[in-house]
Image: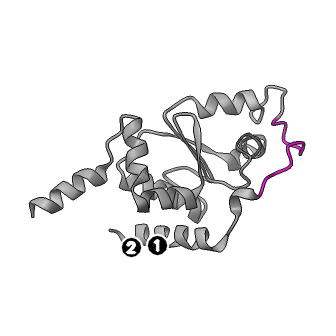
Amino acid sequence: MSGSLRAALRLGAWAARGRPGQRHLSEAAGSSGGADGGGGSGSREAVERLVREHPVVVFMKGSPAQPLCGFSNAVVQILRLHGVEDYRAHDVLQDPDLRQGIKNYSNWPTIPQVYLNGEFVGGCDILLQMHQNGDLVEELKKLGIRSALLDAEKDQEKK
């Protein structure tokens, strides 16, 4: 495992420990950002289209090639570790309405956010936990995506 991946995973583990009860925090539904209508990039309809446009969708800070925060980087690294290269990534820093709209849509206050088959999975801490306990391999399998970790395990068994 590369040093940067280990660092990203440690960062994700730190984040999970450092924010107990995170699921219970939420943004006020009526806050600015236009997530309740209007058809703009942060409207519920627009966010719903983005969430459903691909089996794996990530709302993050930056891009997969250049994540702009450690948590977004950790999500990208976890997906890479599983061999998931075909996914849609949306940079919320480029669109403040989308940034607020996705938070309102999921009722989750932080970025990144990961969606599998149109369903909200969670942020960096949840994806890291799923990676560590094997649930991510199973969820990817439901999408018809074979985790590269399964092939890595077979290669190890051959040695």
Disc 1 target residue: 7
- Residue 38 in percent (x, y) is at 84, 26
Would you say the magenta stretch is mainly helix, strand or loop?
loop
Are dots 2 and 1 in contact, CB under 8 Å? Answer: yes
Q: Height in image: 102 above or below 125? A: above
- Residue 159 in percent (x, y) is at 9, 64
Q: Height in image: 42 above or below 28? A: above
- Left or right placement of residue 76 versus residue 44 in this view: left
| Residue at screen point 30% across, 50% down | 148
Query: Between 138 and 27, which is closer to the camera in this rendering?
Result: 138
| Residue at screen point 57% across, 74% down | 14
Q: Height in image: 123 above or below 120? A: below
Mark 1 crowd level (few <14, some 14–19, many ≥20, 10 Å Cα): few
Disc 2 target residue: 3
Amino acid type, callout 2 = Gly
Residue 12 seen anywhere in this rendered image of the structure: yes
The residue range painted magenta reads: 25-35
